[in-house]
Amino acid sequence: MNNLLYINEETVTKLLNWDSTFKAIEIALECTAKNRAIQSPRTFTKCPKTDSILLTMPGYLDNDAFGALGCKLVTATPNNATLPQPLPTINAHIMLFDDVTGVLKAVIAGTEITKWRTAAASAVATKYLTRGKKLKVLAILGAGNQGHSHALAFSHFFPFEEIRIWNRNKYKAETLVRALNLFANTGKFKCYESNKECVTGADVIVTATFAAQPIVERDWLKPGVHINAIGAGVNHYSELSPDIYNTSDVYVDHAEGAKVELAGLGVKLGEIGGVIAGDLPPPTLNQVTVFQSLGMAVEDCAMARLIYDLYVKQCQKE
Ligand SMILES: NC(=O)C1=CN([C@@H]2O[C@H](COP(=O)(O)OP(=O)(O)OC[C@H]3O[C@@H](n4cnc5c(N)ncnc54)[C@H](O)[C@@H]3O)[C@@H](O)[C@H]2O)C=CC1
Ligand SMILES: O=C([O-])C1=[NH+]CCC1
């Protein structure tokens, strides 16, 4: 008998909520630092026909509420944004397995999950790395899918008075700002014309682009600013200028993955889960901090378990 479930993007989107996503990701990050997660560095397969890269991300998370055995398959295809009918540049599915029998239980659409879990990881890092700091201004560089999900997550979790958005194509930032202000019935989302002006004076910065050259410089930063650098595909640390890394406390989601993917960075890296678990001290108030997000498999395992459980519960009610 085959009980394999397929949970599509529409259903996933209806089931997602910020508070459960935050909890799932906080646990995934903490379990990673506590050796209750198994995830080898992921593989990258570059498709010679296009600019598409396929990432395979297998993992196992040991946790009662969010534990799961799974594997995300995700492609990054920056050219999709330029198609006559643009498609998302990040497309994903997650395979969820029974962790006793190894049988595949569900294939879960993972594009929305990737948007939400990545923004939640930045929110978790921001919560633990900005304790005691006043958070008034957020600057988001990049008005794509991640820029959007970060704007929603950060306005849900933090009391920012102003949320600035910059995009290299200004029209995209303007459109996003208009939609966000309408959605939240507010005027706190603001469009910025230059990346320098956008980050100047900000308390928290998010970079969510494919920029292969720095879009944030060290001397633009306020003392004590926290940066979530989440973008740039395979060039994971190209959005920030090198002297930002050299003069900041830098944290990652997954130290083993960072050994491979951030090999060229040459700075000491802490794991954010260590701060969550209380094994690493939080930064001092004037210290600039960077959360260099790679994205990790057990975040997707935790999210697959969350969505699977919610879906099964919903089906039992109907
Ligand atoms: N750390 C993580 O877990 C994850 C990271 N990502 C990364 O986040 C980044 C953004 O992803 P999405 O928002 O889904 O993509 P998207 O295509 O929806 O948005 C990307 C934005 O970056 C801008 N952009 C592209 N090239 C640029 C450049 N050279 N300079 C400045 N801006 C540029 C585009 O105008 C667009 O608004 C990508 O690098 C992606 O690989 C995506 C998912 C998870
Ligand atoms: O973790 C993830 O899903 C990704 N990281 C970079 C591109 C997609």
Image (cartoon, helix red, strand yellow):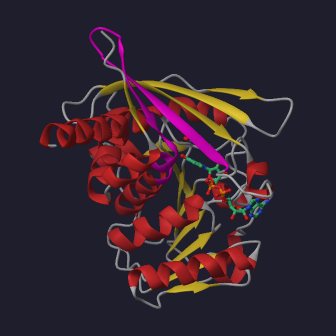
Quarter of the picture holding the N terminus: top left
Location of residue 241 (image quadrant):
bottom right
Residue 96 belongs to the span the image colors magenta: yes
Decide: is 259 above or below 275.
above
Q: What stretch of residues is rendered in magenta? A: 89-115
Residue at 37%, 75% (x, y): give it. Answer: 133
Residue at 34%, 79% (x, y): give it. Answer: 159
Quarter of the picture holding the C terminus: top left
Q: Nearer the viewer, residue 256 or 74?
A: 74
Quarter of the render that holds ligand 1: bottom right
Residue at 71%, 58% (x, y): give it. Answer: 239
Q: Is 27 placed left or right of 188 in the picture?
A: left
Q: Nearer the viewer, residue 15 or 19?
A: 15
Q: Is 170 placed left or right of 145 in the picture?
A: right
Q: Nearer the viewer, residue 245 or 65?
A: 65
Q: Could one spot residue 98 in this view of the protein?
A: yes
x, y percentage for residue 40?
Answer: 52, 22
x, y percentage for residue 160?
Answer: 41, 80
x, y percentage for residue 164?
Answer: 57, 81
Q: Residue furthest front?
A: 318
Location of residue 136 (image quadrant):
bottom left
Residue 263 belongs to the span the image colors magenta: no
Location of residue 142 (image quadrant):
bottom right
Q: Could one spot residue 33 in this view of the protein?
A: no
Q: Nearer the viewer, residue 27 or 94?
A: 94
